Amino acid sequence: MFKKILLGYDGSEHAKKALAKAIELAKICNSELILLSVGTIPAYAETISEIEEAKEQALNYYEKIQREILDWASKENLKLVPLIRFGKPAEAIVNTAEELKVDLIIVGAGEHPYLVRRILGSTADRVVDSASCSVLVVR
Amino acid sequence: MEKFWLEVSLWFVIILISSLISLRLGLTAALVELIVGILVGNTISLEITSWVKFLASFGAVVLTFLAGAELESEVVRSFWKEAIILGVISFLAPFLGVWFLAQFLLGWEIKEAQIAGLALSTTSVAVVYAVMIETGLNEKPFGKLILAATFITDLGTVIFLGLLFTELGLAFWLFVILTLVVLFILPSFTKRYFSYVKNHPSEPEVKFIFLVLALLGYLAAKAGSEAVLPAYLTGAVLANLFIHNRELVKRMRATTIALLTPFFFIKAGSLVDLRVVWQSFGLLALFFLAKCLCKFIGLFPAGMLFKFSFKANMYNTLLMCTGLTFGTISALYGFNMGIITKDQYSILVVAVISTAIIPTLIAQKFFSPKEEELPVFQNPKREI
């Protein structure tokens, strides 16, 4: 059904719930699971070193949390591809999904205060709005 | 004394709030500080005391130094021909175009028009880099060429800002000669000095750089020039040393971003009169369009000359339209020196902020080139 599944993963509690659901689905469909973490780079930066520092911090953090999942996945015989991109999370998830031609995107829904969600929106909202493939939002 | 601490507390409340907003929105602190500064300056009376002036001025100088220290000479050398052509056009076209518009169509005085030209001639290296990193273009030859050209553009702005409003007297020539001598001996001297002090916890490297910047700033001010000129050049000549010493850059940046630049950006924002911006919205749009149009007229044909695809050419031109730090520094210099009025300053700073945001969004949304649309560079040495 779903040959390629892309999971947006930032290590948060709701992302962990999404990970559990993604593994469940990947096992049932025998799919390739792409684990995508997106490092946020400050837009309109002052200096290149500011960006490099943000990039380095994001790389260190995501490499660590992805390694833990990879170790576990290898024991479970699950085909998992780790990936780290930079930019705005929703945009990066949608662009990567198009680039890798995935069939399903899975994201967790964070619990934002009502006002924040109304004004700023959430990553899950944006992914649902702009993705060209199916999207599963895990709560 | 209590009044002093109350003022300090008020400033740090504003700085902290700006920092938290930037964290939440994923924007750089500089842009948020500028915007918060505009809002605060138009709602409460924010006093610009002498200590605020010192921190703000020194913040601008150290930030300019750090921008110069990020210059990758190897990249500029690899694309020197294209980078110089694109960089010079990217500076000269909006500088002359906006100057002409302000002086001959809007009736500004010549020096006021020159400040307008300078403030809108810039390209923000960091804004461009942040955009390219999202697509990985910063690692490709085309991305490196764009970066090299932005360095040349900023160099043009800084040189003209440092020299255009200076009288060519004895003090000026003394400043030029002493600066050149210092720039010549600084790389080898600094290298020896750094290996002597060896990352001592008392931060002798940072203090040494601060001293050099302060001394050259004094010479520049004495000659009627601007301290950012020697600061950028000092950064550029020490770039190779700093690129290999990332820990030092990190420490300098921490000091600068925590204590110095917030005062510069909030002060720069607080001087903007929102009433003037609202009343002169047409003028603001005119300046924004003039900058972008001049960059297009100059850069697009140059891109065609280098056989850039349509998308790559549009992307390059739009990114070259961005500006933030040097545009703000130029406008604030004009205001501090009494060259431009508060009304003119307000319009120019908001025009600069809009150039940081609008061209970036358009470039990312519509013209981000795919791999096959990137120009191919024949010389394998350029694949750095």
Image (tube, rainbow, N blue to C red):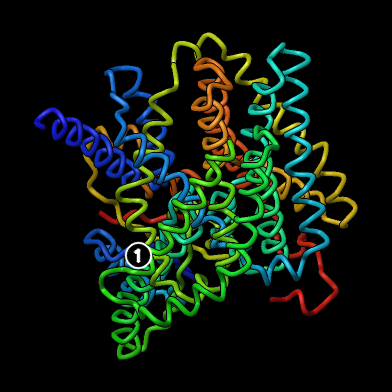
Looking at this view, name the residue that lies furthest to the right: B305
- Quarter of the image with the N terminus of chain B is top left
Judge whether B95 appears above or below B244 on screen: above
Q: Quadrant of residue A73?
A: bottom left
Question: Is residue B354 depicted above or below B100 in this figure?
Answer: below
Q: Is residue B220 visible?
A: yes
Q: Considering only vertical position in the picture, is B49 above or below B148?
A: above
The amino acid marked with disc number 1 is: Arg
Q: Quadrant of the C terminus of chain B?
A: bottom right
Near-viewer residue (A64 or B222): B222
Q: Nearer the viewer, residue A51 or A72?
A: A51
Across and down, in percent, residue B35 comes to: 40, 31
Q: Is B182 above or below relative to A29?
A: above
Q: Position of residue B129 (x, y in %)?
A: 57, 56
Residue lying at 83% horizontally and 76% vertically, measured from the top left? B379
Q: Position of residue A51 (x, y in %)?
A: 46, 59
Q: Chain of mark 1?
A: B
**Residue found 51% across the figure and 21% down from its top:** B346
Residue B146, position in %: x, y?
70, 56
**Figure label count:** 1
Q: Which residue is mark 1?
A: B251
Q: Quadrant of residue B115?
A: top right
